[in-house]
Image (tube, coloured by chain):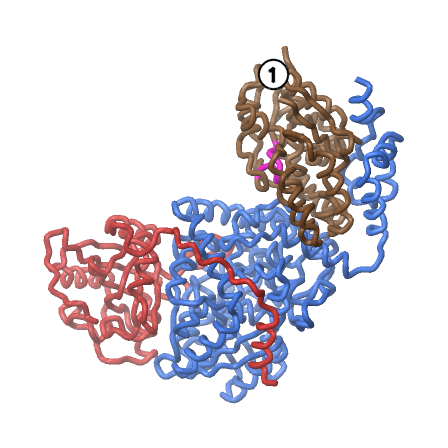
Chain colours: A blue, B brown, C red
Amino acid sequence: MTFLGMPAGRGNLTGAPFPEAARTALKDAQLRRNLAKATTTIRAKRAGVVAELPDWAELRAAGAAIKDQVLADLDEHLVRFEEALTARGTTVHWARDADEANRVVTDLVLATGTEEVIKVKSMATAEIGLNEALAAVGVHAVETDLAELIVQLGNDRSSHILVPAIHRGRAEIREIFRRHMPGVDPDLTADPRALAEAARKHLRHKFLTVDVAVSGANFGIADTGSLVVVESEGNGRMCLTLPRTLISVVGIEKLLPSWRDLEVFLQLLPRSSTGERMNPYTSVWTGPTEGQTSHVVLVDNGRTATLADPDGRAALRCIRCSACLNSCPVYERTGGHAYGSTYPGPIGAVLSPQLTGVVENPTLPFASSLCGVCYDVCPVAIDIPSMLVHLRGRVTEAKRTTPESTAMRALAWVMSDARRWRRFTRLGKFGRTASRHVPLPGWSVARDVPRPPEETFRDWWEAR
Amino acid sequence: MRVALFVTCLVDGLFPDVGKATVRLLERLGHEVVVPAGQTCCGQMHVNTGYPRQALPIIRNHVKAFEDAEVVVTPSGSCAGSIRHQHADVARGQGERVLAEAAEETAKRTYELSEFLADVLGLTDVGAYFPHRVTHHPTCHSLRVLKVGDRPLRLLRAVEGIDLVELPAAETCCGFGGTFAVKNADTSTAMLADKMSNVIGTGAGVLTAGDASCLMHIGSGLSRLRSGVRPLHLAQVLENTR
Amino acid sequence: MSARDEVLARVRRAKGPDQPPPVPRDYRAAGTREVDLALFAERLRDYRARVRVVPADRVAETVAEALRERGARTVVAAPGTPPEWAPAAIRTPVGVADLERADAVVTGCRVAIAETGTIVLDHDAPDQGPRALTLVPDYHLVVVREEQVVAGVPDAVARLAGVRTQTWVSGPSATSDIELERVEGVHGPRTLEVVIASHMMGGTDRNDDSR
């Protein structure tokens, strides 16, 4: 079923089938160590600061409900937001999809005459592939977040929403800097402090000289037209403050109805993402500041298609905290590249197929053991496991008859009647048939196949 | 109390000893056990693999089989979870309002074994004796769908003679996830490897859990490694007496 | 159809017909908790910010002492800060290049949050100055008056309604991008020093709210 013909999103949202991509990642022992270390650390920090708040459950319920309110009247909130922005002197642009958003931004950038823009870490611009679009018109986009810089210098891809270079260890980062960072000290050590200092020096000149910045936004406040960027390093503040032109690319679901709602999200987000009571810097601006020119690009790119699915739209509550990635046993082992999308991990497994349509991303809904940790840690209570199950249904519906669907239908016929089921099990067929007809090659690589018993439970029971 | 046992398809066909142990335990505790003849499967595999339409007749069959039961007990956290959190939704999703309501009624009377022992019977000590070193895997659906908390551990701690050792990273999934273990075999194997190394590291001779499916998964891996660790369902530990 | 009209039309078609239930705000709301000044100082120290709690009438000498210890020679201050805080500081508008050369910046703040150790700057307030002022120099000394400290995030959000341009500062600049290990000091000031002017310590607060 397509949802009322709502067009799908495009951009960096698809990759190789998950099982294949995961197989490659799982063989990388260095990656496994990096991921295990990083996610174990962050999980403990998150658990500690969440446990500090006696009203976490209430904040979570409020956060989910506020986002649901936004989605229920999204058109009205968007119009109010646009009015507030315009009244304050910000120019508002709209984009149906990634291509249009890229066109809007590149046109704005080209009009300034700059050859370089500095960027605040932004999921929306990664999703639409803005850096590539800018490069195509001769503009170099400089990523200023440390992890994004590591990814950019290493000609690599992001593997995590919050910490895009989580798959890299310190020694690898030193190598990337030594090879690709102009003017870097050849004796640079792998000490994280030395690496951060090298990035500081490298970017300082850019901050002070580049005149156009591109950002995303964590929140847009509909009633005031305020934009909010939550960050740690100060690179965001640099980009938002120093250049004369600021272009902010914002997904249409990023709104909060009113200023007061921040009291919920500024508690939920930092504790869920970096495991801090508060992130070092949060910038709020309402209209252009200190002589700047400011633009906001509101992007759909599959969000309305997601909104149209009553069982899937709660994925739009996501505030990109990464708690589900950090807690997921699948993510911890495969890393983010296996998901093939800007949005990896459990939230990516539900969001990416909805943004692109499930046909473009048919393996992601199955990239989960449904263990439920993601739902437990989600600060806006997105029931990811149920949503995965729902999307699996849409995937099987979209496919035509497969060996699997034939087997499942046959098994359903057997299992919906006790006599048929009985005949099936009594003949000792359960195990043998399962191993013959259901493809089990993966299973028996590392596991013995259980032997069917001499007597079923039912036969024992009746003979008793 | 008259207890209707939902033995589950996996236990019926592959692990009958788990069903036998559940019957013996409940009878030893003075309850009458019945096994409604119409039962087959909860349909969870179909639902979770993306076949809700095929699951519907299985759910209908389940609800009908247990419609007269006063209380339903099942030795599986994930089947109890499916009954409580999926049945009505799947039915409603396909416009089956009457079935959805009936499924909700059945769900209200359905308990996973440790819930039944702890909450309905109010028991901690079931009078078991099991002089072995045991470690316990809590299983994802018991923990996070049913929220059974430490009920299984409380029951195990009260077992006479038991040497219960803590399983590191106990709450992490073993990687089974039904058809996940087949569709994403490599990832599942990586998760299983970590679970097994944690189990083996405890030095326990017995691994116990409240779900035959997770035990089948971890047990099949431990067997392949010739590890010598025996997978036993919680009911199989609790049924033993001196 | 314009992109605007088309996106809005899609939203109208896509959104559900049902109104979701009202937002349950059962969390600890603004005005429900006492301020704990000691907790504020402790949370700041958790971020490895330097904290000095002094009576209100000793702020000026404490600022001088802090700047001396820092060895700060070129000091800029937000134009509206009391002149007795760092009397030698530059209080006229300065460009980014000059800020780069400054050893320290001194400002006040609008509100501070005890539970999270957060200090919020209002960039339209003369004693807090434009955004670049507190961003470019490597050392930021901020004076927080006791009555500016609130208990939790909701209290701060309530006080900040209508404030156009804000920076929420919680400790010095930091990153966790390398193996999720926290490293202080990337682009923002690497050192945050906080002077808390307390009434409880016998001082009297002579400074009116700058707003």
| Residue extending furthest toward the top | B242
Residue that carries the numbered disc 1 in the rendered image: B128
> A122 left or right of C143?
right
> A68 left or right of B210?
left
Q: Which x, y percent locates residue A390?
A: 67, 54
Location of residue A191 with respect to B231 vertically, above or below: below
Identify the residue at image location x=76%, y=26%.
Answer: B16
* Residue toward you, A80 or A199: A80
Q: Quadrant of residue B137?
A: top right
Dot 1 amino acid type: Ala
> A55 left or right of C21?
left
Question: The numbered mark 1 sits on a residue in which chain?
Answer: B
Magenta highlight range: B137-143
- Magenta span contains residue B138: yes
Identify the residue at image location x=45%, y=76%.
Answer: A80
Image quarter where the N terminus of chain C lies is bottom right
Q: Which x, y percent locates residue A191?
A: 47, 55
Q: Quadrant of residue A453?
A: top right
Element assignment for label 1: loop
* Residue toward you, C175 or C69: C175
* Residue toward you, C58 or B178: B178
> C52 left or right of A209?
left
Location of residue B50 with respect to A290 vertically, above or below: above
Image quarter where the C terminus of chain C lies is bottom left
Location of residue C61 with respect to B42 vertically, above or below: below
Q: Within 10 Å of the Cα at label 1, are there few (<14), some (14-19), or many (20+) other Cα atoms?
A: many
Q: Which x, y percent locates residue B13?
A: 80, 31
- Magenta span contains residue B235: no
Identify the residue at image location x=39%, y=80%.
Answer: A288
Q: Which x, y percent locates residue A283?
A: 39, 68
Residue A395 seen in the figure: yes
Residue A209 seen in the figure: no
